[in-house]
Image (cartoon, rainbow, N blue to C red):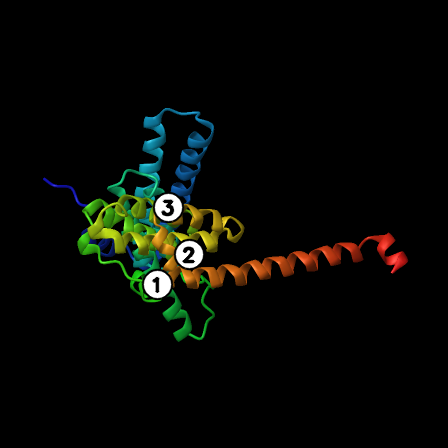
Amino acid sequence: MISQHPDAPGRRLSISLKYTGPQSKEEGEKLFKDANKKRLAFQGCRIFRLCSREKTDDDRAESIRKYLRAAHHFMNANEWEKAGESYENCARLQEMGNEMETIDAAGSYASAALCYKQDKCIKEKNGQQPTNRSNRSVSTVMERIRLPSIDESKLNPIDTSLSRLAHMQMDYKNYEKAKANFEKLAVGLYTDESNEDHADNFFFKAAMCALAHNPELALESVKRYFEMRPNLQETQQFALWFELFRNMEEQIQTRSRRQSVQGLKNDPFYTLYN
């Protein structure tokens, strides 16, 4: 007998048949709390190397299972924001696994986005103020409208999964991880003439993530991309990038000058002689 995927629709249906809304809310809270404990245990083992690799992997896997079950219960209880948080926490753990787990991570991010969207719609309908989650409820498709699209039919399965994960990470403002994955895709494709355009788009998205994550270090990344693909300097995409970079650089310099002046004004000797 083939076991069901932990996030299979059948598992969600079985919960709706066995639990009432209030019961699911209570069970979801318990599972969410247990999943947090397992996640902290995993992070502690990983950082301080206090456990075996097997124990560390077991804690991560158990935390993922509990977050998924919590999400199913919260959905059954119409607690959509908590369901979204459960899926999001689950995705962050899944993306630490092997390459095939990136498929599950992208799916969990998508489910989180849908839950947040549902929560927003219900609260707005009831005249309530939804939680400000920036662009977390924006789908991958919406993200691709704002930036050049990627034709996934030209990618192999692993690259397709990595592309979807990187877009989700960008959508959730995990810019550092998205940049690393876009770079990985670009570097793997730019030597292949049939995929040069894909590589250029991935380099551009990596550059945009670098700019969002740390504007002061972004130029170093872009210089590396130019060394690999000199033609990038002539594209409209990077002309736009440099315009954004200069604007952000001016903002940083202006902010720095203001802070310096304010620091002087707080100096008693400056106040005394000026």
Residue 70 coordinates in the image, percent (x, y) = 34, 49
Q: Which residue is found at the position 41% from the left and 53% from the top?
A: 207
Residue 263 is tagged as: none
**Is residue 53 in view?**
yes
Do tag 1 and tag 2 residues touch (Cβ < 8 Å)? yes
Between 145 and 239, which is closer to the camera in this rendering? Answer: 239
- Position of 218 with respect to 95 (left or right) is right
Q: Quadrant of the C terminus?
A: bottom right
Which residue type carries mark 1?
Leu
- Label 3: state its secondary structure: helix
Disc 3 to disc 1, how far (Cα)?
24 Å
Disc 1 to disc 2, how far (Cα)?
10 Å
Which residue type carries mark 3?
Arg
89 shown above or below 58: below
Do tag 3 and tag 2 residues touch (Cβ < 8 Å)? no
Q: Which residue is found at the position 24% from the left and 53% from the top?
A: 12
Q: Quadrant of the N terminus?
A: top left
- Residue at the limit of the structure toward the left, as seen here: 1
Residue under circle 2? Answer: 208
Q: How many C-alpha atoms fall within 10 Å of the one at disc 2: few (<14), some, or many (≥20)? A: many
Q: Which residue is found at the position 23% from the left and 52% from the top?
A: 195
Residue under circle 1? Answer: 147
- Position of 37 with respect to 195 (left or right) is right
Quarter of the image where one finds residue 3: top left
Q: Which residue is found at the position 28% from the left and 48% from the top?
A: 190
Residue under circle 3? Answer: 92
Count of marks placed on residues: 3
- Label 2: state its secondary structure: helix
Q: How many C-alpha atoms fall within 10 Å of the one at disc 3: few (<14), some, or many (≥20)? A: some
Do tag 3 and tag 1 residues touch (Cβ < 8 Å)? no
